[in-house]
Structures are given as structure tokens and as C-alpha cells.
Amino acid sequence: MADPYPPTDRTTATRYRDRVSYDRAAAHAILDEAYDCSVAYVVDGEPRVLPTLHVRVGDTLYLHGSTGGRLGLTARGDGARVSVSVTLLDGIVYARSHTHHSANYRSVVVHGTAQPVSDPAEKLAAMTALVDKVGAGRAADSRPPSKLDLAQTAVLALPLVEVSVKSRAAGVIDEPADLALPHWAGVLPVRRVYGPPATDAGVGAAPPAYLPGGGSPWVTPVPLTGDRVRLEPLSPGHVDGLFAALADDEVWRYLPALPPRSRDDTAAIVDEVLARQWTGSQVAWAQIDPATGTVIGMTSYHDIDAERRALGIGHTMLGRPWWRTGVNTEAKLLLLEHAFEVLGAEKVFWYTDIRNWRSQQAIARLGATRDGLIRKQRLRPDGTWRDTVLYSMTAEEWPDSAERLRNRLAAGGSAALASA
């Protein structure tokens, strides 16, 4: 166990001493969880406070800034005497009286002298650590700083020597005389929530898996490859290909959405799907012709329930030239293999419009069982109610179904599942 930080006059509390500690691991954990800090320093006898980004590497806290900024200029030469604070708010405490309202929190205060980092290797390492803090692997997935970038960026090193931790993790503390008051009292937890990501214009890549707030493997698409089709995690880079492949009203005939009439309409559909992916309700793939690289459609998991180990396969759109070629059959095989053999699903299910007889036949050929009918399950684009047929396949049924599907594809037969 690491030794605690030694108390000093500046880190010794004058009240609520029971909330203060000098635990090294606790201090590091708070600094690592927080992205930003407040740096207090003095310029010409006047106090200043600067919010900025930080990263901890060992027992050094690196502060990010500009060489032309006030803090960067103040730190030139002998460094700048600073006090750095980081606070994570965990809850708001509602008491029966005004004076006992409070907060649950974890905080760190660091005192010391922040020195400019002049060694190029140390500066680059600190900036790499700062970028990787927002997503492990981001530094390798973005352009490294140029000489000009390094010259314009100030990185200050603050040794973690004079450090204190203060925290509160308790309920309401009211006066005994106030306990009979009729006012609500309690704690409202506070937590940080991420996403969904807003992709910048012109970006073709999908949001990377290292973004904070990403989900479990159940909601993380991975590439899946077959002989007739390759499934790539859906991204904005597929928009043009999808618009070209799916510009056919017949493709959308039984789908619960109007066909896109422009590239922007298609982009909006992709953005909506990626937003649902971030919330964990849908995971989507673009269907690609492996021989040509042409985008030919899309498909997805939906209604994902990792706790009960169940998911749906659907929202499938395939360009008509690839109907009845085995593409959709193989795509379903790839998705079923991933669901049952990688994720460990107990059940996979399908929804389809009662009017879509071709889809129902195709789903049945996969080995799925018709479980029933959900009446008035959703509205169609024309405003009429859709009765939805429900099919499913269980983990116990999968091995036999998998063997039949693989044999069928190996023999070159089977119609594609154009609307499943």
C-alpha cells in the first residue's frame, strides 16, 4: 500500500476534519476520473482562476495551456505557484432546513509550483497521455502535434507532493427538532452521462469504440465477413452507397419508414441509427459486396436486452439487384453466429409485417418458430396500424439451424431474405 501524502499547514483542514484524508490512491483516482481542474495563481498581486484540462502521470500532474496565455506566461522561468482543485459531484443533499442542504462529492486540492515542461520528449509524452485520457487509443487515432503545435502549447508539470482529499458520502443531517417537519428530504444522485456522439461534417468513420460511455459487446458492432457479403459497422461513410443501393420504393414497401428521397434523408437515417446504437437499443451494419466493395444495404440488431440475453434481427434493407442471391441469408447467418456463439444469446427474434408473406417465409427457412401475432404493434408510414408477426430462435435450436443454413449456402441455394 502506497504511503499517504504528508499533511502540511496548507492541507490541514480547519473544520470537518473527518472528511479529509491524504490517501494517495484516493487522490489519484479522483484526478484520473476528472477531465478538468481549476488552477488558482496570482498575477501582479491579483488572484486568478483558470479552468483547464489535466492528466496525471505517476506522481506528476500535467496542466494544459497556451504559451501565450496568462498562466503560461506567469510560469516562465521559475514556474508559477499554484493551487489546483478537482471536484466530482456525486449527489445533492436536500435537508429539511436551508442550512443543512449539502452535497456529496470527492475533491482533491494540490499545492505547489508548476514548472513549464521544456524537454520535448516529456512534453510529447504528456500531451499523448492527455489525449489518451479522453479515450484509450485516441492519440494513435489522431494527428500528432507538429513543431508549431508544440511551440504554441504550454504543458506545466506540478509534482504531487502537497495533496489532500476531501469527500462527503452521506445522507441528510438534520437537526432533531426539524425531523418532524413535512418537507421532503433525501439525496439526489448525480452522475456523468455521455453521448450520443455528434459526428462532424465530412467524417466518414463511425464513432470509435474507445469513446467514453460506450456499451458492452452486445451494443458494439464488429466486422463480420462471409463469401457473399461483408458486414461493416455502419458509419457516415456509407451514406452515399446506401442512397444509391436503396433508391427503390419496393425495398421500403413493408418498412416502418418512408424511403429517403435525397442523400440528406439517408444521412439523417444513419445518424438516427447511430444515436440509437449509443443508447444501446440498436446495433447496425452496412452490407457490402466483398468482391467490389459496393454498399448494397444495411441490417441490425434491435431491442437488445443483454441482461436477459436476447435481441432482435431486423431493420434490414437490401438493394433489389441482390435479392435472391443468398446475400441476405448469409448476412443472417453471420448475425446469428455472432449472437449465439460470441455474445451467448439465449434467444433471437424477428418482427415482420403480417402483409409481408415473403419475409415470413424467409424467416421460417432460417429455422425460426412463429410465436404469435402482436396486433396494432406500430403505425405504418401511411397511418394504418401494422399487425406484427413474431418469430424466434432459441440457443437450443441454433445448432441444427446453423448446420442447415451452412449446408444450404455451401450448395449455392436459398433465396435471399429481402425484407426480414
Image (cartoon, rainbow, N blue to C red):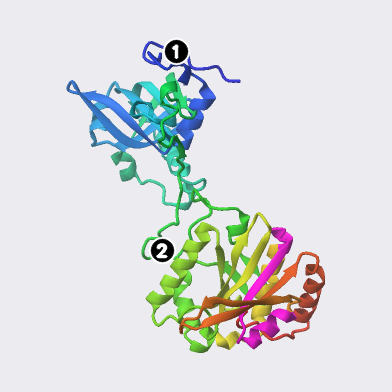
Indicate the quadrant where residue 403 lies. Answer: bottom right
Residue, x 53% and y 86% (percent of image)? 253
Is 32 left, or right, of 363 in this rendering? left
Front position in the image: 372 or 129: 372
Residue stretch rendered in magenta on the structure? 340-365
Residue 61 in the image: x percent, y percent?
Answer: 42, 29
Reply above or below: 104 against 394. above
Q: Residue furthest top?
A: 9
Q: Which residue is mark 1?
A: 7
The N terminus: image quadrant: top right
- Label 1 crowding class (10 Å Cα cut-off): few <14, some 14-19, many 20+? some
Amino acid type, mark 1: Pro
Q: Amino acid at mark 2?
A: Val
Q: Is residue 247 visible?
A: yes
Image mark for residue 203: 2
Sequence order check, earlier mark of 2 and 1: 1
* Disc 2 crowd, CA 10 A, few/some/many (<14, 14-19, 20+): few
Q: Is residue 151 magenta?
A: no
Image point (46%, 82%), residue name = 383
Q: Position of residue 375 (x, y in %)?
A: 60, 78
In the structure shown, which secondary structural element does the residue marked by tag 2 occupy? loop
Question: Considering only vertical position in the picture, is 412 above or below 55?
Answer: below
Position of the C terminus, as image quadrant, is bottom right
Of 179 and 98, which appears nearest the observer?
Answer: 179
